Image (spheres, rainbow, N blue to C red):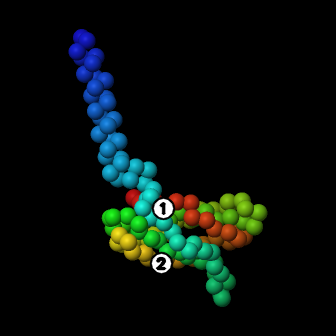
Amino acid sequence: MTATVLRFPLFLVFTAVLLAGLLGACGGDGTQKDAKVANPRLVQTPDGQRVFAGTLVNQGASTIGIAEVEVALYDDQGSRIETMRIQVQDVTPGDSVEFNQTVDSDQPIQQAQVREILIP
């Protein structure tokens, strides 16, 4: 009975280590630490549309097949109103891709900030 009790915890430890390794290989929580957004900006077009734009820079050693840039949108008081996600695809190592997306909101958005970069 003692041998069975010892094997069960060892099995759990082995399983936990295996799962941690798999999650680490997948990026864990889905955030990309080898990518950054350069020159993030909220602009207004001549026809009055608001657009969030920036450049996704791949600082890693692997191609980013698809990434989602999560952007928080704030009012003039600094209160967060909404969050939007912008998809960026096919960024090779050491390269960058410009992106932009229209802000689809009627709210009085005055500021925007990149919260995180997600890799599915």
* Amino acid marked by disc 1: Ile
Look at the picture and state if 2 lies above or below 43: above
Most extreme residue toward the right is 77
The Cα atoms of the two marked residues, 2 and 1, are separated by 14 Å
Q: Residue at x 44, y 76 (%)?
A: 97
- Mark 1: secondary structure: strand
Would residue 101 be visible to someone looking at this image?
no
Please say if 116 is above or below 29: below
Label annotation for residue 98: 2
Query: Image check: 110 left or right of 91?
Result: right
Residue at the spot of label 1: 117
SS at mark 2 in the image: strand
Residue located at (53% from left, 63% from top): 70
Picture coordinates of residue 73, whole percent (x, y): 64, 65
Q: Point out residue 79 in the picture as x, y percentages from the top left corner.
A: 72, 59
Residue 8's spot in the image, x, y percent? Answer: 28, 23
* Residue placed most toward the observer, 102 or 22: 22
Q: Residue at x 47, y 78 (%)?
A: 98
Q: Quadrant of the C terminus?
A: bottom left
Q: Quadrant of residue 15?
A: top left
Q: Is residue 37 left or right of residue 76?
A: left
